[in-house]
Image (tube, rainbow, N blue to C red):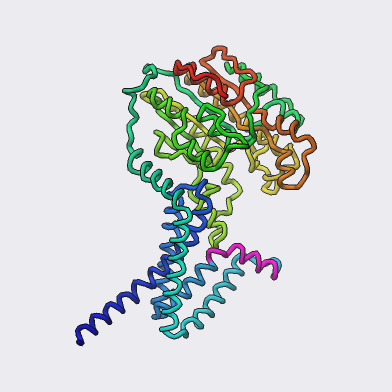
Amino acid sequence: MSCDNDSDMKKTKLMDLILPVLTVISYGIYPIFFVYARNLSYLRIDDFIEAVFFFLPFLLLSFFLLVLGTRKIFNSVLLAAIAYFVFLNFKPLELIVESLIPNVQFWHVIYVFITVLVLLGFLIKKIPYSSARSVSNTLLLIFTGLLLFNVFIYRSVLSTASREWMNNTFIRTGQVRSTESSELTLHTHPNVYLFLFDEYSGPEALQRYCNYDNSAFYDDLKAIGFNVSTTSHNPTIDTKMIIPNLLNLEELFNYENYTPEAGKESLQNPLLFELFSLAGFRIILLNDQSFLTIPPESVDEYFLPQGKLEVEENLLTLIIDHTALYPLRQKGQDARILEIEKMFDFLEADRKPNSSQLLVSYMAFPHIPWVFDKQGEPIPTSSRDNVKDPNIYLGQLQYASKRILGLVRELVERDPSAIIILQSDHAFRQPAFLRNIHGIPIEDEAAEFFAMTNILNAVYYQGHAFDIESLSGVETILQVVNSVLELDLGRAQ
């Protein structure tokens, strides 16, 4: 009988060690999963795993330190839960404190919250063992239930995301592209470069919004050997639609049929990459801000200029921006400047591949934030999101023009048989910015929309004539692909 009692007591003690840890894990994971589940169309399962492995170890370490300090495991569960809540919601709580106490500093708020948590710690330590145990187990049931409920609600999307993750992790890693069954003609092709510069205005839009004649830039491109179009327009001004259209060689998306899920799916293996891979090309991708949802492991070389904490629209940074760690995300004055320099250094690198290469570069430049004047000197941080003064945008565009000309001159000199496509997704969207940010209405929406769709569009085709006048971005790329790969894919619809 005593043996049975000893066995039961050991089981109880073991459960009293395991359940508190499970409780901490459950309320540690749930807020991360909550944010992830509501942004599934923009995020990958890797983002969720990354955020969990970033926050959970710190939470568990804090919990174990509290246990060592208080010698009360269930009481530590409760105090760790309160501290975690304050940590995750530090930024909005700080704003509340600032509204009550003007001119308060970050470290003042930290001191206040730590003081409050210490006082709560003394109070929570006095809670009887049985009561603390009951509350802890209740928290475990609540947060485990919430996790299971959300998994059930989003089960179909999560199932698809899990399959994608498994495929990318175990199938695409180390994948060798086969060309044995390709119908494409396999021979030495020229290197192809596709440079996409976000928000580089076409000449019509630049004249309209900045009263600036950019003909000198186009004259310089012509002197290098480029064919240019000054009247090219894309169907939309939304980059999330335009990029999938460009890389799939088809006007897939418009304002009526686009969904984030469909846009993300269309970039898992875009037609442009598939065709060039089958033809034996080495695929290189520069992906500024991880804006393109193309899996990094699906290309041969992948370059992201940002560190983990510098990427926007990312689950980890989205959560960090609300926590006590948000100062880590306060970018230094030169952070974006350094990123742009790194991207041009990457593009200008002298590669000598064994096979032909397709280099696709997406740069959010001269897109906001505007960090350069026309000479390439940093501008004041207070002006970097000023959409009312078009000269600020214009200065960055003029500097972008200098860098673009320097880049393509070097490429043509080094590789005169190359094919280079210069494009933007849309023009300076000042009317949209003024309406969305400052509430200034657009008087003639049709006219302004058409102007904002005027894009940069130029093609260097081994120094030969190549007519692209008035073609859209998709039509231009499709025409290049047909010529390079000797295909007949028709015209973009």
Q: Position of residue 459 (x, y in %)?
A: 56, 20
User: In the displayed structure, would residue 343 be above or below residue 277?
Assistant: below
Q: Position of residue 218 (x, y in %)?
A: 65, 21
Q: Observer-nearest residue: 44 or 329?
A: 44
Residue drawn at x 54%, y 37% as measured from the top left:
341
User: In the displayed structure, would residue 312 be above or below residue 461?
Assistant: below
**Snapshot quadrant of residue 354:** top left
Left or right placement of residue 207 versus residue 248 in this view = right
The answer to whether any part of residue 161 appears in the image is yes
Q: Observer-nearest residue: 113 or 246?
A: 246
User: In the displayed structure, would residue 376 be above or below residue 473?
Assistant: below
Q: Position of residue 457 (x, y in %)?
A: 61, 24
Q: Observer-nearest residue: 24 or 155?
A: 155
Number of on-image labels: 0
Q: Where is residue 104 in the image (x, y as percent from the top left)?
A: 66, 67
Q: In which quarter of the image is the C terminus?
A: top right
Q: Observer-nearest residue: 300 or 489?
A: 489
Residue drawn at x 59%, y 30% as measured from the top left:
403
Residue numbers of the magenta segment: 87-100
Q: Which residue is at the far bottom?
A: 2
Residue drawn at x 32%, y 37% as measured from the top left:
174
User: In the displayed structure, would residue 89 be above or below residue 3?
Assistant: above
The question of residue 97 being in magenta is answered with: yes
Q: In which quarter of the image is the N terminus?
A: bottom left
The answer to whether any part of residue 413 appears in the image is no
Q: Which residue is at the far right?
A: 443
**Snapshot quadrant of residue 460:** top right
The dominant secondary structure in magenta is helix
